[in-house]
Every structure is written in C-alpha cells, then in structure tokens.
Image (cartoon, grey):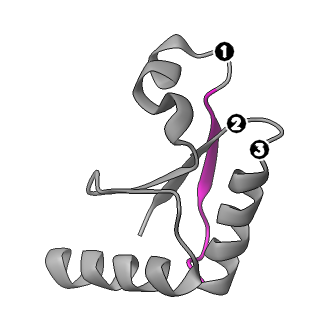
Amino acid sequence: MALTLYQRDDCHLCDQAIEALAQARAGDFRSVFIDGDASLESAYGQRVPVLRDAQGRELAWPFDGSLLRAWLEQGRDQHG
C-alpha cells in the first residue's frame, strides 16, 4: 500500500507521526514537505501531519500506532 506523509519542516507532531508509522509497521512511505508549496499549504495547512493512502483516504493527526494499524487494515479490507 503506497502511503504519503504530508508534513512540515521542524514539526514535532510530524516526528511523532513517523514514530507511529514505525510502531504500526506500516512499511515504506513517501514524505512530502508542504512548506513553500501554495497548493499543498492550502490543502493541508495546519492539519499536518496527514497520512494519505493510494486510494485517497486521509488520516489526520492525532493518531498512534494502534489507530494507524486499524486504519491500514480497514483500507486493505475495502480495497482487497
């Protein structure tokens, strides 16, 4: 499952989100820094960190490893 983590530079919540990804054993993910990108700033602004999967589902902060695991499982169940 392809995951993208939208984040900002110097964001302690983003660091915690990365820890949650590790706890959930979510696998590889792509980091996208929204700083300086007007369209991403508009879309994600103060909501970061936000995790997005290949189906377009988004999980906004706050989340921990167990919530993230459940979200990932739900996505697998819905999309085979």
Label 3 sits on residue = 11
Q: Where is residue 17? Give x, y as percent.
A: 65, 63
Q: Residue at x 78, y 35 (%)?
A: 9
Tag 3: Cα neighbours inside 10 Å, few (<14), some, or many (≥20)?
few
Q: Quadrant of the N terminus?
A: bottom left
Q: Quadrant of the C terminus?
A: bottom left
The residues bearing labels 3 and 1 have C-alpha atoms spaced at a distance of 15 Å
Q: Which mark is residue 8?
A: 2
Position of residue 79 relative to residue 54, above or below, is below
Q: Residue at x 55, y 33 (%)?
A: 46
Cβ–Cβ under 8 Å for marks 2 and 3: yes
Tag 2: Cα neighbours inside 10 Å, few (<14), some, or many (≥20)?
many
Q: Where is residue 39? Give x, y as percent.
A: 45, 16
Q: As shown in the figure, which amino acid type bears the numbered disc 1?
A: Gly
Asked which secondary structure carries label 2, the reply is loop
Q: Would you say 40 lies left or right of 57 here? A: right
Label 1 sits on residue = 36
> Which mark is first along the chain, 1 or 2?
2
Asked which secondary structure carries label 3, the reply is loop
Q: As shown in the figure, which amino acid type bears the numbered disc 2?
A: Arg
Q: Residue lying furthest right in this view?
A: 10
Position of residue 49 relative to residue 61, above or below, is above
Magenta-span inclusion, residue 78: no
Q: Would you say 8 lies left or right of 59 here? A: right
Q: Would you say 27 lies left or right of 44 here? A: right
> Which mark is first along the chain, 1 or 3?
3
The residues bearing labels 2 and 1 have C-alpha atoms spaced at a distance of 10 Å
Picture quadrant where residue 64 is located: bottom right
Residue segment shown in magenta: 25-34
